[in-house]
Image (spheres, rainbow, N blue to C red):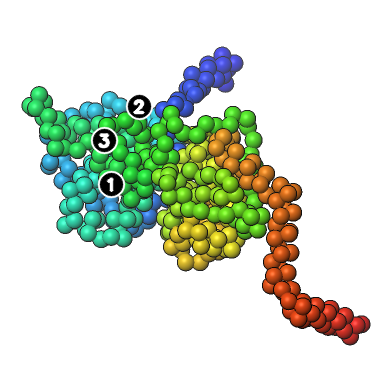
Amino acid sequence: MSFSRLVNDIKTMLDTAEPPSTYDCCIYKVPSDIRTLNENAYTPKFVSIGPFHHGHPHPQIQNMERQKLIYFKDFLQRTETTLNEMVYYIDAILSDFKCCYSETLPFSHDELVKLILIDSGFIIELFCRSYYDVRCINILSIPWLYVGIRSDLMLLENQLPYFVIEKIYSLSLSSTNASVPNTNIPSFLKLTTDYFDYYNKSKLDFDKGDISIRHFTDLIRIFHLQHPIENRPSRDNINKQIIHLPSATELLEAGVRFKVNTESKCLLDLRFSGGVLEIPQLIAHDGTEIMFRNMVALEQCRYPYESYITDYVAVLDYLINTGKDVDILVQNKILENMLGDSDSVANLFNGLSKYVIHSNISLQFSILCKDLNAFCGNPWRQLMLTLKLKSTLMRDYCSTPWQAAASFAGILLLVLTLIQTVCSCK
């Protein structure tokens, strides 16, 4: 190869080396070190949406491809626009669509257009049938399948950009008489929040349309943040790890009392005052790990400096080390254990923070950790606890001369027995 041709080839390579738009990117492959901890938590089991898992060989996912076509066909029969208009729209925004993904998509132009239309039509039809409670079709009439699909639709890798589906829904409602809008037709945001209402524990109201979401995983995270952006806890801009926090057992032994926070609707609203740690109730069930893992993965990729869910998970990881810690939180109604085994719940939360990077922490959790550590490390409090323990022993074992003599005799007998055992072993 000639020198000039080599130089031209390098220049051609450099012309294609344009940095991706990090602002537009919102749908990511979960970082490999996190993903390997639990592949199933990030992989759809029933239905693939978007390009990352398209063509997945799982039999259940392959069977759903036919169902997706049926739903898409029914969607087209109800739409007030033509298939041509929808294809024209997808063709026009295809470059913007690709920018939403963290990896290059190995599909042709035509393959992507078909994928987007079929998956969008399926989702719109599914949401409409759910909203109007049309349960005659098998997906909605079989509870385990309905729940499984809803779980798949919140996975970070299993997403379409929200603006694409919303626009296709809008096109499907376009009427020749646009001057007379039908106020009875719900917005796509209304359909979406209704479909995912199970995760909206705070019952947030988005009727005014005052919310911007990028995809369904993003919506699940917003449900759990609860606070509007302007009222969310401020961040500590100093890069540092979350301060060490004693476990629930250690806190209880140090005199901290636990109380379920019933006043706040926000899961993240942990409070500590007057020796009482208030925590909103969390239900631990089969889908808890999947939900938190995907929200944390989203924050690792998209919101590293607004990682409120990641902070919350880190706090729980410190509080819960063993099944005994779980039992303490269950007894105080802070945790509702639907997994049955306390150790399973402990393992769940102990694994959520592994390989997770904490760029910074919210000021709220930073103060919480400092206050709890200060409370536990207060020497006067330690002295009071020692005196309290001594008082308890005196009350239980030395309340009368006879009881004190019996306790002393019991201790003496135990010591003599121990000495005899040691001597006999020599």
Q: Position of residue 117 (x, y in %)?
A: 25, 38
Give yes or no for contact between labels 1 and 3 (Cβ–Cβ under 8 Å). Answer: no
Task: Measure the alpha-carbon separation of dots 1 and 2.
Answer: 29 Å
Q: Is residue 4 left or right of residue 246?
A: left
Work out whether mark 1 precedes mark 3 in sequence or the reverse, and give the earlier one: 1
Question: Which secondary structure lies at badge 3?
Answer: loop
Query: How many numbered discs, if any?
Result: 3
Q: Nearer the viewer, residue 206 or 294?
A: 206
Q: Amino acid at mark 1?
A: Tyr
Q: Position of residue 137 (x, y in %)?
A: 18, 56
Task: Measure the alpha-carbon separation of dots 2 and 3.
Answer: 31 Å
Q: Nearer the viewer, residue 140 or 371?
A: 371
| Structural crowding at the residue carrying mark 1, measured as other residues with C-alpha within 10 Å and reported as few (<14), some (14–19) or many (≥20) | some
Q: Nearer the viewer, mark 2 or mark 3?
A: 3
Q: Is 91 drawn above or below residue 70 in the view shown? A: above
Instruction: Kindly identify the residue that appears in the image at 51 percent across and 53 percent down.
Output: 259
Residue furthest to the front in view is 400
Q: Nearer the viewer, residue 281 or 388?
A: 388
Instruction: Kindly identify the residue that appears in the image at 73 percent across and 76 percent down.
Output: 400
Q: Which image quarter: residue 46?
A: bottom left
Q: Amino acid at mark 2?
A: Ser
| Structural crowding at the residue carrying mark 2, measured as other residues with C-alpha within 10 Å and reported as few (<14), some (14–19) or many (≥20) | few
Question: Which secondary structure lies at badge 2?
Answer: helix
Q: Is residue 309 left or right of residue 219?
A: right
Instruction: Kindly identify the residue that appears in the image at 28 percent across and 32 percent down.
Output: 209
- The residue indicated by pointer 2 is 95
Give yes or no for contact between labels 2 and 3 (Cβ–Cβ under 8 Å). Answer: no
Can you say which quadrant of the picture contains the C terminus?
bottom right
Q: Amino acid at mark 3?
A: Asp
- The residue indicated by pointer 1 is 195
Question: Which secondary structure lies at badge 1?
Answer: helix
- The residue indicated by pointer 3 is 207
